[in-house]
Image (cartoon, rainbow, N blue to C red):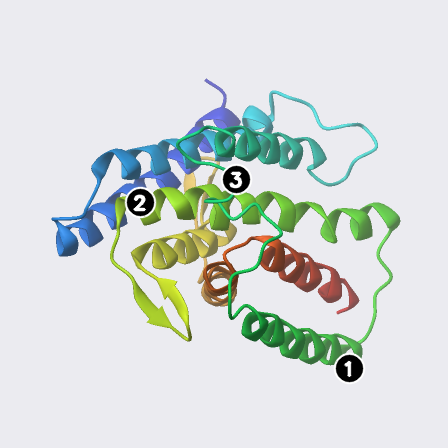
C-alpha cells in the first residue's frame, strides 16, 4: 500500500470514527430515541464521501487543465444526490428544495448582514485578482458539494439518529448540528500526511459551519447555505 493511500484511508477513518464516537456519546443522553443504524449509516456515508472527494485517494485523475479538484467535487456531489434519491432519504427531507419554511426571512436577513460585513472587510483588506478557474470553482463547487453532504444528507442521518431538538433563534437544532459543525472544522484542519497526524485549531470553520446549519434548519432548505458558503469563498478571493 502506498503512503498516499494509507494516509487517505487513515484520514477517512478518522473522520468516520469522530462521527461514531460523538454520536454514541450524545446518544447516551437520549437512549430512548437514539437510533444506532442511522448513526452507522452517517459514518459509512461520510467515509465513502471523503474517499470519493479525494478521487479514491488520487487513483482517479483530475483534468490536466485543472488546478482545483473538479473531479473530486463532482463525484462527491453525484454521490450525495444519489443517496438523497433513495426513498428512505428523499430530496425534500434532505433540504434539496427551493421551498422555504415559514420564518425563513430572518435567516435571509442574517445572510444579508453577513454579506455586507464580509464584503466590506474584503474591500478594506485589498483585492487580489484570481484566475478564471479559481473564480469559477470557488463561486460554485464548495457550496454545492459541501452543503449537500454536510447540511443535507449527513445532517438528516444524524438528526434521525439523535432525535432531541431545541430552538436556537427559531431553528430546531440538536446534537446533529454540533457534530456536523465540529466535523466541518475537523476536515479543514486535521489529516494524515506521510503517516503523521497534522492538525490545527478549527475555530473559524466550526463557527461558520454552525451558522450554515442554523440557516439550513431555519429555512428547511440548503439553498441559502449554498449561496452563503459560495459567497464567503468567493468574496475572500479579494483578500
Disc 3: which residue: 91
Q: Nearer the viewer, residue 95 or 59?
A: 95
Q: Which mark is residue 160?
A: 2
Structural crowding at the residue carrying mark 3, measured as other residues with C-alpha within 10 Å and reported as few (<14), some (14–19) or many (≥20) = some
Total labels: the figure holds: 3
**Mark 2 Cα within 10 Å, few/some/many (few <14, many 20+)?**
some
In-front residue for pair 56/81:
81
Q: What secondary structure is found at the residue carrying circle 2?
A: helix
Q: Could you tell me which residue is drawn at 49 percent across and 25 percent down?
A: 5
User: Pointer 1: residues within 10 angstroms few (<14), some, or many (20+)?
Assistant: few
User: Residue 207, position in %: x, y?
Assistant: 47, 67
Which residue is rendered at x = 87% and y = 61% of the image? 129
The residue that appears at 41% across and 51% down in the rendered structure is 183
Residue tagged 1: 124
Q: Nearer the N terminus, badge 3 or badge 2?
A: 3
Q: Quadrant of residue 201?
A: bottom left
Report which quarter residue 69 is drawn in.
top right
**Horizontal relation, residue 106 to residue 10: left or right:** right
**Mark with earlier residue (2, 1):** 1
The location of residue 87, given as percent across then percent down, is 44, 29
Which callout, 1 or 3, points at the residue further toward the start of the chain?
Answer: 3
> In the rendered image, is residue 199 in sight?
no
CB atoms of marks 2 and 1 within 8 Å: no
- Give the number of the mark in front: 2 or 1: 2
Whether tag 3 and tag 2 are in contact, CB under 8 A, the answer is no
Q: Position of residue 233 (x, y in %)?
A: 68, 59
Amino acid at each position: 500500500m502506498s503512503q498516499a493511500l494509507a494516509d487517505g484511508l487513515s484520514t477517512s477513518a478518522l473522520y468516520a470514527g469522530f462521527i461514531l464516537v460523538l454520536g454514541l456519546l450524545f446518544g447516551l443522553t437520549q437512549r430512548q430515541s437514539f437510533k444506532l443504524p442511522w448513526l452507522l449509516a452517517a459514518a459509512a456515508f461520510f467515509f465513502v464521501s471523503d474517499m470519493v472527494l479525494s478521487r479514491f485517494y488520487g487513483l482517479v485523475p483530475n483534468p490536466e487543465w485543472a488546478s482545483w479538484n473538479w473531479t473530486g467535487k463532482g463525484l462527491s456531489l453525484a454521490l450525495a444526490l444519489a443517496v438523497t434519491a433513495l426513498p428512505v432519504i428523499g430530496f425534500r427531507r434532505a433540504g434539496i428544495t427551493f421551498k422555504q419554511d415559514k420564518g425563513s426571512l430572518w435567516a435571509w436577513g442574517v445572510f444579508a448582514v453577513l454579506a455586507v460585513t464580509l464584503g466590506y472587510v474584503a474591500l478594506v483588506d485589498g483585492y487580489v485578482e484570481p484566475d478564471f478557474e479559481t473564480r469559477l470553482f470557488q463561486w460554485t463547487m464548495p457550496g454545492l458539494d459541501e452543503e449537500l453532504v454536510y447540511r443535507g444528507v449527513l445532517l438528516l442521518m444524524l438528526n434521525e439518529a439523535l432525535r432531541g431538538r431545541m430552538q436556537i433563534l427559531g431553528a430546531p437544532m440538536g446534537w446533529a448540528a454540533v457534530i456536523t459543525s465540529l466535523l466541518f472544522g475537523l476536515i479543514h484542519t486535521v489529516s494524515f500526511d506521510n503517516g503523521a497526524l497534522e492538525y490545527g485549531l478549527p475555530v473559524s470553520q466550526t463557527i461558520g459551519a454552525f451558522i450554515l446549519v442554523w440557516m439550513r434548519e431555519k429555512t428547511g432548505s440548503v439553498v441559502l447555505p449554498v449561496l452563503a458558503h459560495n459567497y464567503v469563498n468567493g468574496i475572500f478571493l479579494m483578500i
